[in-house]
Image: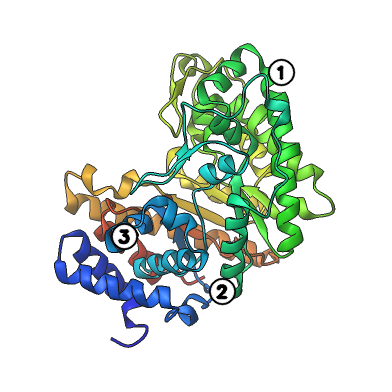
Amino acid sequence: MNAHSELSFHYGINLLKRWQNGDPDALVELRVVFDRAIAGDYDKNFAELPPEDSVHIGGSVNLMTLNVMHVLYGHDSREFYKGDAKRYVRTTMLTRRLLGFNKLYISWPSYAFSAEAIGQETMYPDRFPPGSDPDRMLITRENWQDIRLTDFDNGTPKIIDDILEFYQDLTGMDPILQITAPYSLAADTYGQEPLLGDLVHDPDFANTLLDHLADNVVQPWCEHFFAKFPRGWVEFSDASGSPFFIGPKNCKDLAIRSLRRVIDNLPGDLGDRLYDANYRGDYVATVEKGERSGRRHRGRNGTTTQPAAETVGLRELTDAKHSICRDLVIRLEDDRVPVDFYAQEAVAQNVPLFAGIGAALIDRNSIEDMEKAQHDVRDLTRERVEAIKTVAQQIKSNNYEIRRPPWPGTIYFEDINSESSFRLVEIIVEEALNNSAI
């Protein structure tokens, strides 16, 4: 093998398929490739920018890389995520290349890191990502006013700075800070159940808590980031504030409102470089109020709540989402609204389209008929790639001003892990690469 042949699409994905199927030679070969990445042998490859004339392919691969690093080197999640910034960047870049992604960017467990940054007790399992200790919540009714973030020279804020600094030096790409939006930050440090209870019984306190976190944690972190990385972007994560979890009205009036507070309060035009693209479950805004009132919704940690009667429809929810994600329109798998709706919205807003590939769609443990799954995923990919291309072509004719990271649109794997079917991933990437020219 030469220095880069193992990073070519079919070679890399075939190596991962062989490893997943228990081929001992593949395990040895995978160790060689990861050793090379850690040593910096592929740094020039990682510095290759994604194309501007074809659809991007990217996604979340943190859990998969963690599992590989645990198998190859015995690293637990603490060592993997926090042990060595350069190693973390290089190994996650490598995973993306092996999968065939043409868009490389860096991410980490933003929920756990954001909560830990303000003092939340955090659990670090061996082969699973870290998370807040649900039995030791940081915030109470008595101490919430004391919570703030002021130390950026230690702990997880410093680890993130180190990761982004090396990523920027390595790739030349604009760094993206990924942190938690106020609602999910509250859920991870105050507790899902207490916060859901406040939505129903004491919404004034819920809003006050979110505003406090916005003003004293999120905004200072953004200001620190932009001072250090003036070309950067901030991407928020707020799955707990999604409409399928707390309902469209609460999503709009609490979660999105508190995030808008940060965007509006940042000085100058910095707010234009903030966005949240992971609110999911738009379909609940299309369900009649009477049907929706009896339904219980599940959040990312498995907690359920029965939302109050809603009055926010899909149009109003979509407008609210645009207000905190102004440079792209994204359709996630759990939205369940036809892709055409999002394509039309993207054209209307003159921004690119991102199309999510849900983790369940490629989960090898849930596939009963692999032949049918391959056929279905091929058709699905073609539809989504065509939608992304159509949007890009139309907005380009409207004199779209190219901005990174959105242009020209992305096929986005919402989660790839060691239990994903690499055959299905291969089909999706192959279809996207073969039909992606703008």
Residue situated in front as seen by the camera: 262 or 191: 191
Can residue 1 be seen by looking at this rendering? yes
Return the residue found at the far top. 201
Q: Label 2, on which residue?
A: 171
Count of numbered labels shown in the rendering:
3
Quarter occupied by residue 327: bottom right
**Mark 2 Cα shell of 10 Å, populated few (<14), some (14-19), many (≥20):** some
Q: In this rendering, would 373 be left or right of 304? A: left
User: How far apart, in angstroms, are the residues tagged by discs 3 and 1?
Assistant: 46 Å
Judge whether 376 appears above or below 228 on screen: above
**Mark 3 Cα shell of 10 Å, populated few (<14), some (14-19), many (≥20):** many
Where residue 51 appears, as percent x and y from the top left, is 52, 74
Identified by mark 2, the residue type is Thr
Where residue 356 appears, as percent x and y from the top left, is 45, 50
Q: Looking at the image, which residue is at 41% across and 66% down?
A: 91
For residue 68, the mark is 3
Q: Looking at the image, which residue is at 16% across and 47% down?
A: 369
Q: Looking at the image, which residue is at 49% across and 56% down?
A: 82
Quarter occupied by residue 199: top right
